């Protein structure tokens, strides 16, 4: 009899596939919990793993079983120290399961908890979201000229010389040429020998000259010859353009109180997580504005503080300026997302709306506006009214009046596989 | 420490190496030989806690097909483990040939010294010798079969879509407990034959379908008005088998899945019926072999004491709680030994056939030929009943209290014994449901019957849900008649 010992520890992750299956099956229940969490969680918590609770009834596996409360029931119980024959013992209301081997699963808890990883959480969160179909379609249609490698060719400009291939060619040429040279050399040496044997001075002289010439020819085989040159070639191809940039515009003026700023930041946090997850290549530009607009980095955008009056146009102009400087519309798919409380003074709102139509929408693929408020007033704000006049498939807006509306608003703006609605009221 | 040095000296400390595990196995083997423990070759596999959880969810099978329910059980078990509510088993062993025993990497040397004799000699010899295991399982073929099942299910998912496969398996799993031939011996598993026959069945199924299509355009003769004969002729208790063979609308691959679920359920049939005996046997032998190893100075006192500490925890029996199979089984085997070696007058009265016999011969005979129910009925001693302070209690549906019928030490020993044995019958917790009618030539309706005893009725909600699955599989109406003990229908689902 031979006994073996095997170290199984390296084969890990056998349970992963079944975990995916159960998560898929539970996606409805999990989604509901994740949606609730969005409102409760702190901004920086979205990136962490998440504890969720699942009701056992959601994952019930039924089978024919005997109702423990029914009929006559007899049991044998160990450890009796108190009772005599004929004594009565109160019955526990649960009825008690059959003794001995566990009937059913033997677990009486109604729910169980487990942790979702960051990826699983985000994928549940953004399951339904997608860049609008219109946008995706256009993404594929836009042609762009690109170069791709096309192998090695004999002619080209000196900058594209492929050194390794050139040397390879040179070796081949030299090997061929030297073989021929050696044959000629041997022949010339043999001729000289014959001439010497014949002892005719003129013949010897001629043979010597011949040998000298052959030797010279051998010395003349160049190390590198123009015929050796090889160049890398690039072929021009047409391909859809995939570079994209998302502008995040946030109002941080004094009228944006902490509650509103929090809502706006939540909106952008989710938008940011969504974009960075789904589109690895989307560049992000953060612009915050009071009466002046400023381009800031991600950290300042979400965590910085600033106050002042409001001028929406300043942010739109800043976006236009940055597009002009760094993101030419011919090379980038440009998206814009704006969050504000809707306050604007004087002609700012109509000017902004006009500027959006005239300047930004023509160069953008999609622009969304999220209006944040505390729900205290139902009257439409000036900016909302002004934006309502925008009739474009590339524009969409939604209002957010509480933490629990942030995600639905985002979901509405980036609904999957549905035609983009015109501006909603 | 150098292994060569330790070979002659005693194992000690808590760290271990692979060589230590092999050494323990070798020591145990030498002692086990003296007791004529016949085992399959051992294959010990060191695994992590996560892998242990993994084995939990597929009942110890190292290979299983993919299904969400295994993922669910994994989540539940790992949650309990992480919160500290449940400790993990130190080992899991499956009756295969070679006998695969999973040992946790986190076990101390002493724990490994406990679980190796327990799993590799106790459980191993039990599953090789016990008649139920011999009749119902094929240790040589099971791993092959599981591999075949896993690949077949994966293949079906690819061909027919993961959702349809999942729905089919969900429905089949609901009927898992009704997939047993309790009285017929199952056929041997043979993966190669299985594959050939599977192909043959597929051809036949296709041919039948083609013929059905052909006949559907041929004018039919007048339907005979004679009453159709009752089919099946006698009630069929194996629901899964009946579905596999007769479900009108199932596709061939779904029938194959039914077969796989049925075969795997069958494989665990002996385990469920020998828990007390099997755990008691393994506990008895690890206790014995550990002491032998200590006596031969193969393990030191520290290890022995740690093992005894764990051993004591394993056989702890809380009062007024569910009977611990380890405790009951261990005590029962020790009692058999005592009755063989030093019987009292009482023992001679209750267990005359083993009193004074050779204990080892008796042990092997009992291990080979009994299951929990018959084991307890035959070998539970009055002393054990007293030691465990057993009492038999009884209640009725409408009552709010239990009545004590019998207590150990009194006249009621035999009543306690038979009641205890009866609670280990499969029928005491798995309802008896059988197919009584299938309207093969009419409406294709399926009629099931549940026979209840002592007013123990079906759980209504669970039954409705299970029937929903069954109706989906069947494709036509399915009703379930619940009968009381006198054969009267009390409820129709």
Image: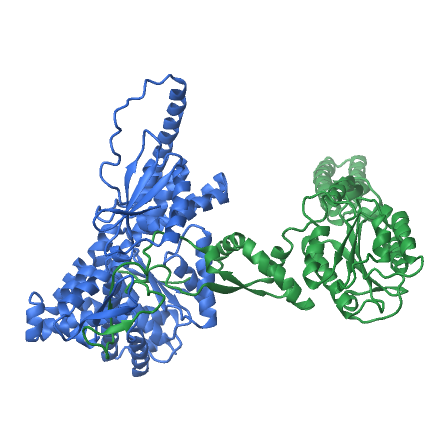
Chain colours: A green, B blue
Place of residue A130 in the rendered image (x, y in percent of width and height, measured from the top left): 69, 49
Q: Please state, as top left, top right, bottom left or bottom right, where the N terminus of chain B lies in the image.
A: bottom left
Place of residue A421 in the rendered image (x, y in percent of width and height, measured from the top left): 75, 45
Task: Using the image, determine if residue A345 lies above or below residue B302.
Answer: above
Extreme-bottom residue of the structure: B301
Q: Is residue B493 left or right of residue A314?
A: left
Identify the residue at image location x=50%, y=56%. A19
Identify the residue at image location x=74%, y=64%. A263
Q: In terms of depth relative to the viewer, which is nearer, B478 or B488?
A: B488
Place of residue B193 in the rendered image (x, y in percent of width and height, measured from the top left): 31, 40
Identify the residue at image location x=8%, y=73%. B346
Q: Is residue A314 left or right of residue B162?
A: right
Q: Can see residue A233? A: no
Q: In terms of depth relative to the viewer, which is nearer, A273 or B50?
A: A273
Q: Is residue B417 left or right of residue B479?
A: left
Task: Using the image, determine if residue B78 lies above or below residue A246.
Answer: below
């Amino acid at each position: 009899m031979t006994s073996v010992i095997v170290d199984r520890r390296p084969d890990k992750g056998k349970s992963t596939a079944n975990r995916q299956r159960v998560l898929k099956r539970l996606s409805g229940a999990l989604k509901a919990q994740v949606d609730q969490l969005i409102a409760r969680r702190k901004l920086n918590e979205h990136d962490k793993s998440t504890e969720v609770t699942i009701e056992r009834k959601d994952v019930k596996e039924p089978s024919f079983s005997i109702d423990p409360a029914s009929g006559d029931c007899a049991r044998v119980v160990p450890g009796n120290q108190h009772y005599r024959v004929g004594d009565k013992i109160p019955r526990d209301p649960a009825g008690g399961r059959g003794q001995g081997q566990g009937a059913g699963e033997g677990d009486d808890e109604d729910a169980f908890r487990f942790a979702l990883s960051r990826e699983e959480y985000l994928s549940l969160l953004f399951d339904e979201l997608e860049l609008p179909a219109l946008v995706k379609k256009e993404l594929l249609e836009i042609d762009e000229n690109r170069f791709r490698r096309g192998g090695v060719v004999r002619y080209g400009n000196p900058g594209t010389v492929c050194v390794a291939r050139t040397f390879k060619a040179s070796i081949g040429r030299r090997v061929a040429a030297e073989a021929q040279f050696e044959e000629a050399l041997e022949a010339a040496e043999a001729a000289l020998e014959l001439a010497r044997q014949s002892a005719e001075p003129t013949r010897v002289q001629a043979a010597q000259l011949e040998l000298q010439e052959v030797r010279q020819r051998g010395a003349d085989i160049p190390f590198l010859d123009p015929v050796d040159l090889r160049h890398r070639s690039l072929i021009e191809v047409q391909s859809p353009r995939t570079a994209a940039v998302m502008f995040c515009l946030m109002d941080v003026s004094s009228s944006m109180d902490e509650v509103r700023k929090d809502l706006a930041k939540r909106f952008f946090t989710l938008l940011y997580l969504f974009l960075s997850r789904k589109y690895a290549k989307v560049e992000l530009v953060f612009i915050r504005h009071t009466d002046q607009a400023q381009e800031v980095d991600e950290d300042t955008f979400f965590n910085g503080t600033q106050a002042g009056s409001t001028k929406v146009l300043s942010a739109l102009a800043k976006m236009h300026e940055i597009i002009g400087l760094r993101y030419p519309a011919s090379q980038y798919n440009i998206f814009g997302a704006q969050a504000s409380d809707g306050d604007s003074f004087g002609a700012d709102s109509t000017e902004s709306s006009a500027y959006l139509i005239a300047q930004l929408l023509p160069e953008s693929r999609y622009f969304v506006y999220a209006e944040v408020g505390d729900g205290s007033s139902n009257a439409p704000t000036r900016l909302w009214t002004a934006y309502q006049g925008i009739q474009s498939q590339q524009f969409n807006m939604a209002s957010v009046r509480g933490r629990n509306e942030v995600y639905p608003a985002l979901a509405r703006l980036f609904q999957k596989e549905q035609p983009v609605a015109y501006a909603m009221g | 420490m150098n292994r060569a040095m330790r070979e002659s000296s005693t194992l000690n400390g808590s760290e271990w190496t692979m060589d230590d595990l092999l050494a323990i196995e070798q020591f145990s083997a030498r002692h086990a030989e003296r007791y004529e423990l016949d085992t399959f070759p051992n294959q010990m596999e060191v695994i992590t806690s996560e892998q242990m959880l993994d084995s939990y969810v597929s009942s110890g099978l190292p290979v299983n097909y993919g299904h969400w329910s295994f993922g669910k059980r994994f989540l539940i078990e790992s949650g309990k483990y992480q919160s500290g509510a449940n400790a993990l088993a130190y080992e899991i062993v499956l009756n295969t040939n070679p006998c695969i025993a999973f040992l946790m990497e986190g076990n101390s040397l002493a724990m490994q010294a406990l679980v190796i004799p327990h799993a590799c000699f106790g459980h191993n010899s039990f599953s090789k010798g016990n008649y139920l295991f011999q009749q119902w399982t094929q240790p040589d073929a099971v791993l092959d079969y599981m591999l075949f099942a896993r690949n077949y299910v994966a293949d079906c998912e690819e061909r027919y879509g993961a959702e349809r496969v999942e729905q089919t398996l969900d429905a089949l799993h609901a009927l898992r407990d009704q997939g047993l031939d309790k009285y017929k011996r199952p056929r041997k598993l043979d993966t190669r034959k299985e594959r050939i026959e599977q192909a043959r069945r597929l051809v036949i199924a296709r041919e039948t379908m083609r013929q059905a299509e052909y006949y559907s355009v041929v004018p039919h003769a007048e339907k005979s008005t004679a009453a159709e004969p009752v089919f099946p002729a006698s009630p069929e208790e194996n629901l899964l088998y009946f579905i596999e063979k007769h479900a009108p609308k199932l596709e061939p691959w779904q029938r194959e899945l039914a077969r796989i679920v049925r075969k795997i359920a069958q494989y665990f049939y002996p385990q469920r019926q020998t828990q007390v005996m099997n755990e008691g046997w393994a506990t008895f032998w690890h206790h014995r072999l550990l002491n032998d190893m200590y006596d031969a100075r193969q393990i030191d006192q520290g290890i022995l004491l740690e093992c005894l500490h764990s051993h004591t925890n394993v056989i702890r029996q809380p009062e007024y709680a569910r009977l611990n199979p380890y405790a009951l089984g261990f005590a029962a085997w020790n009692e058999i030994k005592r009755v063989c070696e030093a019987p009292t007058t009482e023992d001679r009265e209750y267990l005359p056939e083993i009193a004074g016999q050779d204990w080892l011969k008796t042990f092997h005979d009992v291990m080979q030929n009994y299951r929990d129910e018959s084991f307890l009925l035959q070998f539970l001693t009055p002393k054990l009943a007293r030691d465990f302070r057993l009492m038999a209690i009884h209640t009725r549906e409408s009552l709010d209290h239990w009545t004590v019928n019998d207590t150990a030490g009194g006249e009621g020993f035999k009543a306690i014994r038979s009641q205890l044995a009866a609670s280990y019958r499969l029928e005491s917790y798995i309802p008896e449901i059988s197919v009584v009618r299938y309207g093969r030539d009419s409406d294709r309706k399926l009629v099931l019957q549940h026979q209840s005893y002592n007013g123990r009725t079906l759980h209504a909600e669970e039954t409705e849900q299970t029937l929903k699955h069954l109706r989906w599989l069947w494709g036509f109406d399915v009703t379930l008649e619940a009968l009381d003990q006198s054969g009267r229908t009390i409820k129709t689902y």
